[in-house]
Amino acid sequence: MRPLKIKVEGLLKAVKKGRGGVSIAHHKNTAGMRVIRIPTPPFVQIAMRQGIGAECTPVVKVGDYVKLGQLIGDSDAYISAPIYASISGTVTEIKDIKLSTGVMSKAVVIESDGFMAPDEFVPPVVTDAKSLVAAVRKSGLVGLGGAGFPAHVKLNLPQEAKIDTLIINAAECETYITVDYRECVENSVNIMRGVNAVSKYLHIDNVIIAVEDNKPIALQILKEIADSATQGEKVKVMALKSKYPQGAEKMIIQSATGRKMPPGKLPSDVGCVVMNVASIAFIGRYVATGKPLVSRSMTIDGSAIKTPKNVRVPIGTMMDYIVDYCGGFVEEPEKIVCGGPMMGSAITDINYPILKGNNALLAFKKGDLSIKKETDCIRCGRCAAACPLNLVPTNIEKFTKIGDIPKLKHSGALVCMECGSCAYSCPAGKPLVQHMRLAKAKIREEDAKK
Amino acid sequence: MSEVTKKLVVSASPHFRSKTTTTSIMLDVIIAMIPALVASVILFGYRSLVLTVVSVISCVVFEYLSRKVMKRHNTIGDLSAVVTGMLLAFNLPSTMPYWMVIIGAFVAIVIAKQFFGGIGNNFVNPALIGRIVLMASYPSQIGNFVAPFSHRGGVDAVTTATPLAQMTSVYSAENIGTAIDAAGFPSLLDMFLGVKGGCLGEVCILALVIGFVYLVVRKVISPVIPLVYVGTVAVAMLIAGKGDFTFMAYQVMAGGLVLGAVFMATDYTTSPVSFKGKIIYAIGCGVLTSLIRIFGSLPEGVSFSIIIMNILVPHIEHITTARPFGEVKEKKNKKEAEAK
């Protein structure tokens, strides 16, 4: 009877675990393309607000000559990261600009002298957790996966936290984007260096590099290098099922360790630190060379781009310059997305500078994005089945519309990470993510009143 | 320089959407019902097709008119009225007068569906309400079943009793096995293929199973509700029949059970969203159907049991809605707190 029991249990597990997430066409068109460094742009606009955290104050004046990698902006705030010049040249202007995210920010405009003359870089002295965190802050690193959260904050673990697992997130579950994959293929040495540094100084015993199983080459390369590294069994490379949103923090922790991160908690509460693969590769290179974050890899793709490419661009490069480098538009695009199609944001123009967190720029032709007409909810439950966090988006939408705050709170709207699985699968074409954001805003507004 | 001269579309993420729409789902349901429709035409003649067409057209017209009168946007394009029309016809005998079908369609679409806000807002299955109103208003016409293939004889249609109506004598019998033999039921194979008296869409189990498989493969419905519903009835009948498998097989294939389980109990709007909720709902349907069949004065109870469970759905939802990912159950917390 025993095998039967196991089968039944496995079946139940499959039924239960099968819930959540959606299967989307991967569109990894640029997977085979090496990351190419684009020609030095004539000028860059480096925003002083690069992502989550405080805005930096410029430390250079108009007319100053700056070298590549020279400090140009910093802040005293804890949640912030310094900003470095991404090209060498003259500071021509310091002005307020609007960013692709819609917020206003000060920006330092540097006109290139064409040399990309580097500053002198000194590898940081790292001996313990504290010096590692200090070094990561100094490097200017923010999460390169998209959110742009200062990396040193993540690594500055509370004293009482018992961290046993470092998860390297190379899932790259978003469609189109392939820069994390390229990082695995081209830069595995630095990934291992970064893994070694972080796990050594933060005293983490297990490392799991998690990759979706639609990237067999990356898996193989990482496995080889993990095996040959002196770490022995410490570093594991794990193939995850290709299902969006596998790369979300909560999902990847569950897939890699089986632990569930409760709402409102941090990965450190379940003994994990999660880092994007590009971020860890950067740390690996930084501890070896001391060169701060001045450029990043991006996927430039979408039906409206003539020659899709993976490019390495200086931070602050204008988007139109990058599009030009990729052959321009095939035709006037209908929509331009900064980031992946599932979680990225549609932008209003391409006259924006690249931020540290931008991992893709996608332009789509008219009619390419299936925009559905919104109809009435038929309560089919596809949104609930797609939600990886067990929410029932259709109910949250209903409660938001009638303004039932207690029910909204109970429904767990604040847990939503806006992965878009619900809206993707909705046959009635409802903008559910928008309703989720509205729900959160309503709850916060109500809380603020108290 | 690359330039954007036209205004770009800016909207909330995600920028990709699945191709599934309400219309495509309804179209899948219609396709899944076609085998049963074909079977009914073979068994009961062209009149079943005409009946279905009358029902569908009147449903669509009522949907259009009521939306117009209520000054709401037109929804006939989503094809849900077509599905309701087909289901209503499937739940009626082929001899039903056409004007009665139109009354049924009016009740289903205008009263049960549009009065409550249209698609997605009805609290009970419209087609079933249509059938129940007809059943209460015209009991003799709705019980007027003809024998299959009798349309071919050129003579007047031969009326016949449905297996479930004959079944009433079996329930009280001492020995179920001999009672079944004595009642003169169609063979189990005929039961499966639909060579028996009954409503249009319910007789051919084979066609309904094909429809079920299609819907599951196309991921239109989850197999949970139909399987649990039919399973519950099977278990209940096995108990009632004191372990007689033949009795159970007749019970499962007789009447509207399979049609109801596959096409009506699975209606999105009137069934629970969660996995647990679906199981509770389907078991409820099964238990009620069995109770009505065995103890009730009506031979069949599928419509009523689904309607009753439809009404209970909000309560089932309330107790079964899953908690957000990683949230610890309150009870557990309390226990832990007590332990401390």
Image: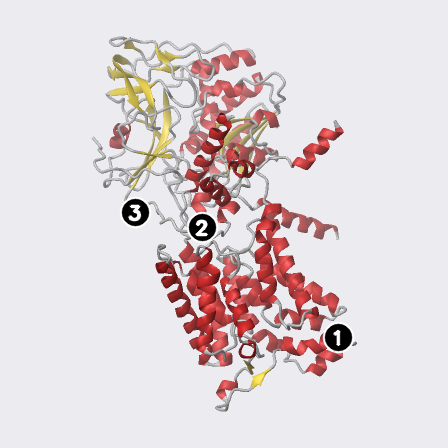
In the image: residue A42, left or right of residue B322:
left
Of all chains, the one bearing label 2 is A
Three-letter amino acid code at the position of disc 1? Ser
Of the residues under marks 2 and 3, which one precedes in the sequence?
3
In the image: residue B227, left or right of residue B219:
right
Mark 3 crowdedness (10 Å alpha carbons): few <14, some 14-19, many ≥20:
few
Instruction: Judge if badges 1 and 3 mark residues of a common chain.
Output: no
Judging by the rendered image, the residue that carries numbered circle 1 is B172
Judging by the rendered image, the residue that carries numbered circle 2 is A377
Q: Is residue A232 in view?
A: no
Judging by the rendered image, the residue that carries numbered circle 3 is A367
Gap between marks 1 and 3 measured at Cα? 66 Å
Q: Is residue A189 in view?
A: yes
Query: Which of the pair A436/B111 is nearer the observer?
Result: B111
Three-letter amino acid code at the position of disc 2? Cys
Gap between marks 2 and 3 measured at Cα? 24 Å
Foreground: disc 2 or disc 3: 2
